Amino acid sequence: MRRTTVTTLAVTAALLFTATACTDDDITTAPSKTGAAEQPASEPADAPEDKPAEPTVAKVGDTITLKGQEDGEQVDATLKKLVDPAQPKDEFFAPEDGNRWVAAQFELTNTGTKPYADSPSNGAGVADADGQRFQATFADTQAGPSMTSDAKVPPGEKALGWITFEVPKASKIVTVQFGLNSGFAEQTGQWKVS
């Protein structure tokens, strides 16, 4: 009888260990929700009743507060400048024939309680007037120093740098987007640039 009790206890312990070990992993394969960060629209007191107030839209120079996937992840993202076209930093690298580079300077201030650890260019993109969307490319331009590809920003500190996009010469860029967690966070900031 004693052997059966030891065996039962061992099997029970193994099952509890297995059940506990499996509950810590959470793998999500569903796409994240995305959307432009919106600021509440305000209507001036003397606005005509037949004309609705236009919503506030972020533009170059504006800051959008974005949350990450985990509690405590929060960044104030500012699109400081946009250079279109952006010239190559040297003669060794250039956009492909028929394309040009566009560079966006971001200032990312960690306003959360956890370190901001990310590759910021992974979460950045631009869109043209036709709806074509373009992700960042690795390129150094004369606009200035590139954004780090391995940001580790403590709360209260900043990361500043340029993110470059390769787009067709004929494309008219109208918006710039940015999201945390390599773009997988539920919030995406959007700035109108044209």
Image (tube, rainbow, N blue to C red):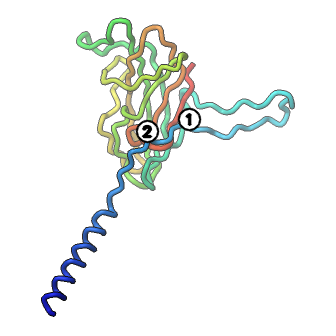
Q: In this view, does 161 lie to the left or right of 35?
A: left
Q: Which of 171 and 33 is in front in this view?
A: 33
In the image, farthest residue toward the left: 3
Three-letter residue code for mark 1: Ala
Q: Which residue: 36% across, 33% down?
A: 122
Which quadrant would residue 142 be assigned to in this image?
top left
- Tell me the number on the disc at residue 58: none
Query: Where residue 85 sits: x, y (%)?
Result: 43, 13
Q: Which of 4 and 84 is in front in this view?
A: 4
Query: Where residue 116 sits: x, y (%)?
Result: 38, 46
In the image, farthest residue toward the top: 97
Q: What kind of element bears circle 1?
A: loop
Q: In which quarter of the image is the C terminus?
A: top right
How far apart are labels 2 and 1 at the CA level?
17 Å
Query: Where residue 71 sits: x, y (%)?
Result: 45, 55
Instruction: Reply above or below: 16 against 167.
Output: below
Q: Which residue: 32% across, 58% down?
A: 25
Going from the N terminus, do you reach mark 2 or mark 1 first? 1
Q: In which quarter of the image is the N terminus?
A: bottom left
Mark 1, other Cα within 10 Å: few <14 / some 14–19 / many ≥20: some
Instruction: Reply above or below: 183 against 48.
Output: below
Q: How many labels does the image show?
A: 2
Mark 2, other Cα within 10 Å: few <14 / some 14–19 / many ≥20: many
Query: Where residue 27 sits: x, y (%)?
Result: 35, 51
Asked if labels 1 and 2 touch by Cβ distance under 8 angstroms, the answer is: no
Three-letter residue code for mark 2: Leu
Q: Name the residue under label 2.
A: 108
Q: Mark 1 points at which residue?
A: 36
